[in-house]
Image: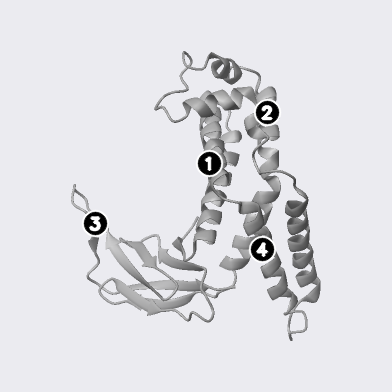
Amino acid sequence: MNTHTTYEFPLNERIRVFMRLEQLFQQLSHFMGGNTVFDKRAAIDTLLDILTIFSRSDLKSELIKELDRHAKVLGMLSNSEGVDNQKLQTILNDLTQASRNLYNASGKVGASVMESGLFQSISQRSAIPGGSCSFDLPAFHYWLEQDEAEQQKDFQQWTLPFADIRIAIDLILGFIRQSSVPKQEVAHAGFFQLALDTAHPVQLLRVGLPVSAECFAEISGGKHRFSIRFMKPSNDENRPTQAQDDVTFTLSRCAV
């Protein structure tokens, strides 16, 4: 059971997109594991969201750059005192393999998914609220009623192009999150602000609060500074209000 709630805030667009994809991949795995029609529908909707993100930018090259940067940073630690070189080499091998797999992948990521006639028809109707009803897409209705083994076979084919992408994102975000030790801070009257060192750009902020805390963290910021407001939820129709008491929390400034 979790004793703390963690609020994360990315400080650049690259990490923001990686985190959105991370969540979508987790949702996709969850719904693919379900055995109801609505699980399959939710999995398709999530896959469409993933495809939309990939249609807007060249994420493959962004991931390769980030993997290579992490490998370079970790490679510089090999001669440092107290470093477990065997573990470090394993990590470097994982980074190198992930980068190589992405580099060798041909074509635009996800393009093969849209070659499926069924998926094309679902995609075309997805912008319409409720547009995938049985009378709109009888072929989709037929697919939803098929044997689960056949559905899983299709899902495996549709999600295979994203396997290396997901591995790369998990590696990158994992390193970033582990790059900083949480430090205890106090937000006076529910507010905390801090300037950032632009010479060592922070990529991700992580704020930890006990689950018993009767407030949540509202974070904003950029490369120069950030602020955190601890807000108390409203029990009625009013907007949340800033906490008036001091709030103790943990802060990680991840800058690997």
Quadrant holding the C terminus: bottom right
Query: Disc 3 marks which residue?
Result: 240
233 relative position to 34: left or right: left
Image: 22 above or below 192: above
Figure quadrant of residue 51 = top right
- Observer able to see residue 38: no
- Label 4 crowding class (10 Å Cα cut-off): few <14, some 14-19, many 20+? few
- In the image, what residue type sits under mark 4? Lys
Chain-order first, disc 2 or disc 1? 1
Q: Position of residue 202 (x, y in %)?
A: 51, 73
Q: CA distance from mark 2 to mark 1?
A: 19 Å
Q: CA distance from mark 3 to mark 4?
A: 40 Å
Query: Disc 4 marks which residue?
Result: 65
- Label 3 vs label 4, nearer the camera: 4
- Label 1 crowding class (10 Å Cα cut-off): few <14, some 14-19, many 20+? few
- In the image, what residue type sits under mark 3? Pro
- Observer able to see residue 68: yes
Q: Position of residue 15 (x, y in %)?
A: 53, 60
Chain-order first, disc 4 or disc 2? 4
Chain-order first, disc 4 or disc 1? 1
Figure quadrant of residue 176 = bottom right
Query: Disc 2 marks which residue?
Result: 154
Q: CA distance from mark 3 to mark 2?
A: 44 Å
- In the image, what residue type sits under mark 2? Asp
- In the image, what residue type sits under mark 1? Thr
